[in-house]
Amino acid sequence: MVYLTRKAEFSASHLYHNPDFTPEENRRIFGKCNNPHGHGHNYTLEVTVKGEVDPRSGFVVDLKQLKEIMHREVLDALDHRFLNKEVPEFLQQIPTTENIAIAIWRRLVDKLNRAKLHRVRLYETPDLFVDFYGEE
Amino acid sequence: MKAHLSRRYLFSASHRLHSDAMSNTENQSAYGKCNNPHGHGHNYTIEVTISGQVDASTGMVCNLVDLDDFVNREVLARYGHENLNMLPEFSNQVPTTENLCIHIYEILQRGFTHAHLERVRIEETMMNSFDYAG
């Protein structure tokens, strides 16, 4: 078994707000992330897949295909978007780093052919990241 | 839905690696320049990984404010800009980054109750890092 990781970057804006909370609760729990017009990040995405090395190609996965899948399924939808308003998953759910990592996993997990998705790591900033290993 | 969240923090401290259980020659041989008598310093990076179910109402494993407050108060305030050899935990123990990593893990394990502690990683330099998961 070999693990292969491909990185990508996207930039997006978001805000944290739960309509079931009072304005005071939203402010207390989410702090500046609750500012009403949103704010942005440069996200770094690391997608790790695992599999046996194909003896003919020497690949776990065709990197070109993986890159295309990541672009089509994730970056085209998230890059330079206001996540709360433009990405379906976040119309009803807060786009925290945790939830974005889970949404990216769900967008990718059935799209890979040979290799199996192992981990989605999403950096919101260089000092904060989330790992998601699948539904538990 | 279980997710892992990792947060990185910086602090600077000095230390000297010297074991009273070894002769001067042995100390020199084991620790090299790290045994120089007046110590030296590093910019340490700590990476704390916690895990838990993502709360449906907040979208979070735990509130970062709670983690930041705890680490600032219990770890960074304790070790930042200190000479590690002067601290009680290192009065009888060499302040290697392995030992420091275990101490920081134990501080979090004992006191941080908002999520499950998975791992503490310390990068002593860009070239050396240490992980402790209990």
Image (tube, coloured by chain):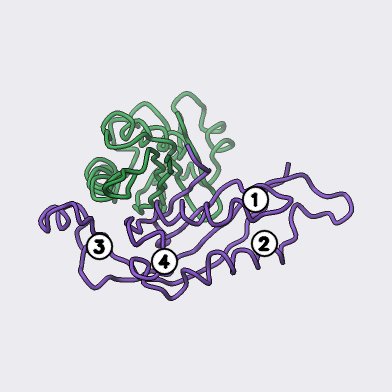
Mark 1: which amino acid? Val
Q: CA distance from mark 4 to mark 1?
A: 25 Å
Q: CA distance from mark 2 to mark 4?
A: 22 Å
Q: Position of residue A111 (x, y in %)?
A: 64, 56
Taking depth in this image into account, of A1 and A90 the one nearest to the observer is A90
Q: In the figure, A11 relative to B38: above or below?
A: below
Mark 4: which amino acid? Val
Q: Please state the chain letter of the residue tagged with numbered disc 4 in the rendered image.
A: A
Q: CA distance from mark 1 to mark 3?
A: 32 Å
Of labels 2 and 4, the one closer to you: 4
Q: Position of residue A99 (x, y in %)?
A: 40, 53
**Residue A49 disc label:** 1
Q: CA distance from mark 2 to mark 3?
A: 32 Å
Which residue is denoted by mark 2 in the rendering? A66
Mark 2: which amino acid? Leu
Which residue is denoted by mark 3 in the rendering? A33
Taking depth in this image into account, of B15 and A90 the one nearest to the observer is A90
Taking depth in this image into account, of B84 and B128 the one nearest to the observer is B128
Tell which residue pokes out farthest to the bottom in this image.
Answer: A80
Q: Colour of chain A?
A: purple
**Residue A87 disc label:** 4
Q: Give whichever of discs 1 and 3 has the lower sequence position.
A: 3
